[in-house]
Image (tube, coloured by chain):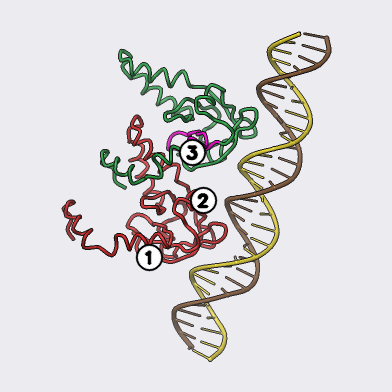
Chain colours: A green, B red, C yellow, D brown
DNA sequence: ATGCTGGTATTCACCCATAAACATTTTCTT
DNA sequence: AAGAAAATGTTTATGGGTGAATACCAGCAT
């Protein structure tokens, strides 16, 4: 299970160090794709497979479902970690997530997320720092700690 | 089950002594994460697992749920007690809970909570001194001792 | 009152992850 | 085919996390 927050930087060649704690669980091959909220999702191969199955089961007669599925598959790229523990992020994805130099990498349960440092800060100011508001919304899910 | 209130201090490297009464129950590995009300939660491994299952089951198509899940997982760090009875608190978490030198550690049933001494004082002044008002509100939950 | 013991704080030194600089290979272009 | 540019690989220095050793303190019992 992935968790934690790490700060790294992308080098001039678009490579990014993956936190050493994530490497083993990601394994040899994994999938980087466009994520929700303008970040990138990184799935280990088996997690990607389960996600793929779920996506497949969506009714492809509905326009929204088609768009959602296209979003994930078109944005996906198979990737691997080099001997220095880095991955190369395709430029399309770099642009999508507005990745410049400073990058935040977080573990979120079954996936890893890659954020532009600036966007992560914005996102947190909008949601994460205001945990009370989130907790309030969670009532809808009848969630308890 | 955790209970009690203890005063300790964080050293220059961000390490904190865990009260000896908590050590056995926390076990070898446990998880420290951002908690509600600006404190940190410390869960024994098995408690964290049950929490994780609940978090995983939340619909990731809902923005609020994503924010909530990110909040917990990105704020989480696996930790262990060193031979001196201390744990290392990641700087992200130290900042979140505004932990300076003086720290209050309390046991709350299934988890341990770590508070900045100042915030704990504030919190108690804001709420704790008015137990009767809180108890009054508890009626809504049909709670009885 | 004094010495003992368990727990706590501080200091220091080492090791590893990271990131930047550098070197090499490959590919594309002219 | 040769040179340039891009991609990939290697090396090294630095800083931070980590562990050990020592010094400190309080509580307790004799």
Q: Residues within 10 Å of mark 2 (few under 14, many from 20)?
A: some
B11, C14: nearer the viewer:
B11
Query: Relative to residue D5, is residue C5 depicted above or below?
Result: below
Q: Residues within 10 Å of mark 3 (few under 14, many from 20)?
A: many
User: Which range of residues does the magenta coloring cover?
Assistant: A103-119
- CB under 8 Å between callouts 2 and 1? no
Corner quadrant of residue A103: top right
Whether residue A118 appears in magenta in the rendering, the answer is yes
Label 3 element class: strand
In the image, taking residue B139 as reference, residue B103 lies left or right, namely right
Residue to which mark 3 is pinned: A106
Residue to which mark 1 is pinned: B5
Q: Residues within 10 Å of mark 1 (few under 14, many from 20)?
A: some
In x, y percent, where is residue B30?
Answer: 44, 51
- CB under 8 Å between callouts 3 and 1? no
Residue A38 visible in the shown view: yes
Residue B130, numbered circle: none
Label 2 element class: loop
Q: CA distance from mark 2 to mark 1?
A: 22 Å
Chain of the residue that carries numbered disc 1 in the rendered image:
B
Query: Relative to residue A80, is residue B121 depicted above or below?
Result: below
A88, A54: nearer the viewer:
A88
Residue A43 visible in the shown view: no
Quarter the N terminus of chain A occupies: top left
Marks 2 and 1 share the same chain: yes
Residue B90, numbered circle: 2
Query: Relative to residue D2, is residue A132 depicted above or below?
Result: below
Chain of the residue that carries numbered disc 3 in the rendered image:
A
Q: Residue at x 32, y 63 (%)?
A: B125
Corner quadrant of residue A48: top left
B81, B106: nearer the viewer:
B106
């Amino acid at each position: 299970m992935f968790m934690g927050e790490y700060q790294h930087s992308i080098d001039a060649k678009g490579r990014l160090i993956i936190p050493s704690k994530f490497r083993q669980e990601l394994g040899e091959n994994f999938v980087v794709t466009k994520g929700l909220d303008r970040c990138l999702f990184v799935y280990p191969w088996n997690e990607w497979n389960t996600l793929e199955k779920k996506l497949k089961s969506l009714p492809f007669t509905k326009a929204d479902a088609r768009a959602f599925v296209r979003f994930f598959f078109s944005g996906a790229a198979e990737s691997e970690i080099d001997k220095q523990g880095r991955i190369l992020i395709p430029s399309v994805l770099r642009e999508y997530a507005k990745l410049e130099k400073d990058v935040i990498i977080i573990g979120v349960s079954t996936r890893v997320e890659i954020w532009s440092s600036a966007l992560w800060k914005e996102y947190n100011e909008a949601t994460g720092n205001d945990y009370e508001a989130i907790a309030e919304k969670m009532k809808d899910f009848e969630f308890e700690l």
